[in-house]
Amino acid sequence: MIRAIGLDADDTLWENETFFRLTEGEFCAMLSDHAEPDHIASRLIDIERANLERYGYGIKGFMLSMVETAIQLTDGAVDGRTIARILELGQDMLAHPVDLLPGVERALDDLSDRPLILITKGDLMDQERKVAASGLAERFAAVEILADKTPEAYARVLSAHDVDPRDFLMAGNSLKSDVIPVLELGGWGIHIPHGPTWVLEHAEEPDAPRFRKLAGIAELPALIRGIEQG
């Protein structure tokens, strides 16, 4: 039996990565006099990767990385208006409404016969805002906002909720963050792809007996019933 179900938030319950890519597109257009869009995007990714340990995941780190990229690409000549526009773009992202993905509410209803744990990562304030704005908070037995999704972080969450990893199932859009760490602990990892995936979340699809892939979250209740029925 699966005693508890973990669900990712961004791009599993609601839209997220699309807004990053739209903002990145506008950022590249702003700096088009200094480099080609592909070069700007590549430099931004490199800087984001280097900054993860400093800023963690989320919009605020993305904003700071865009500022740093603009400074580097212009050799320090970037003007105040451009910096102000970058900050404005980030602030717009932080204020964006939460748009639930299709089938989410029905799936949560169908899964409500056992504890649901919302497990997300990123900036604490922004993630708390989105959880509250989603209207879904009361459907979860717990909400866990992590700095990163590592096997060790999942183990701490499961220990705190007295759940054996072998009796746990985690579903989300990221192989790297939502699936592989849980498989390493002996749990079930369910991949539900959605839209573009941030390059720093890319990973190879695992070859593991407890790995499954679904077209949408609406398929999750039936999958769990099938797993339990053997």
Image: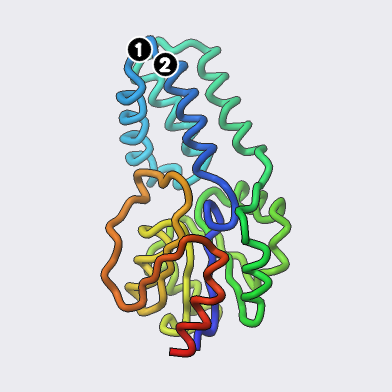
Q: Which residue is mark 2?
A: 31
Residue visible at 57% across and 27% down in the picture: 89
Q: Which quarter of the picture shows residue 94?
A: top right
Residue 162 in view in this figure = no
Type of the residue with mark 1: His
In this rendering, the answer to whether 62 lies above or below 31 is below
Q: Position of residue 24 (x, y in %)?
A: 46, 29
Neighbor class of circle 2 (other Cα within 10 Å; few <14, some 14-19, many 20+) is some
Whether 140 is drawn above or below 115: the answer is above
- Spot occupied by residue 198 in the image (x, y as percentages of width and height): 40, 44
Q: Secondary structure at mark 1?
A: loop
Q: Is residue 98 left or right of residue 71?
A: right
Which numbered circle lies on residue 34? 1
Numbered disc 2: secondary structure: loop
Q: Residue placed at 38% from the left, 14% from the top?
A: 76
Quick check: 207 left or right of 148?
left
Crowding around mark 1 (Cα neighbors within 10 Å: few <14, some 14 to 19, many 20+) is some
Placement of 117 over or under 29, stated as above or below: below
Q: Cβ–Cβ below 8 Å for labels 2 and 1?
A: yes
Q: Does residue 184 appear anywhere in the picture?
A: yes
Question: How many marks can you see?
Answer: 2
